[in-house]
Amino acid sequence: MNLSQLDYQWFQAINDLASRFAALNPLMAFCADNLDYLFYLGVIVYWFRRTPDNRRMVFNALVSAAAALGTNSIIGSFYHRDRPFVAHHVIQLVNHEASASFPSNHAAAAFAVAASIWLWRRQDGRVWFILAALIGFSRIWSGIHYPMDIIGGAILGILIAVLIGKLMRWQLLKWVSESLIRIYESIEFKVWKPQKTK
């Protein structure tokens, strides 16, 4: 059995859960289609807590997610893998266009953000990794990704987040990121001054 066959076998086992545990389908469909919005909300909350470390962490997370999605786009332009519902009969809970399946954009972005947070805040990062894994699992359950799509996206997202984290320690890139944050804050503080602590 080759990797492709094994991947499809794993997909069938997970996707079949949609018929065996149909009561969970609304939750899984919601996670597959909407749980990534929690990542957007999380990034916003961290940013507006307005601590220097949070701002650097969010900056790194956004750069990592953008780099992961950009890399995915490049991979997808060279290697097009059909989604499961194109090639097979599946239980599909979420409508989706027949775009490239590998690697998963949702997994790449979610794991890039989770890894970026983990590099700064270990405890918080574990929670975000669990949520990222739930996004990936639910998208297999919902019939729109193979397991290897999710695993590939997760590995890519984590590796890029670690790489960005290391690159941002370079003096030039650190200066650029700090400068961009300061420019933003100079505008923000004119509109919304931080409260002075006693």
Image (tube, rainbow, N blue to C red):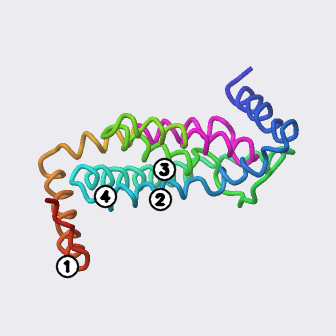
Determine the CA span between mark 2 and mark 3.
Answer: 11 Å
What is the secondary structure assignment of the residue under circle 2? helix
The residue under label 4 is 49
Q: Quadrant of residue 52?
A: bottom left
Q: Is residue 128 left or right of residue 87?
A: left
In the image, the segment drawn in magenta is 132-158
Cβ–Cβ under 8 Å for marks 1 and 4:
no
For marks 2 and 1, the one nearer the N-term is 2
Q: Report the residue at 28% width, 52% height from top.
A: 54
For marks 3 and 4, the one nearer the N-term is 4
Mark nearest the camera among 2 and 3 is 2
Q: Amino acid at mark 2?
A: Tyr
Determine the CA span between mark 2 and mark 4.
Answer: 15 Å
Q: Report the residue at 30% width, 40% height from top.
A: 120
Mark nearest the camera among 3 and 1 is 1
The residue under label 3 is 109
Which residue is farthest front?
198
Mark nearest the camera among 2 and 1 is 1
Q: Does the magenta stretch mainly form a helix, a strand or a loop? A: helix
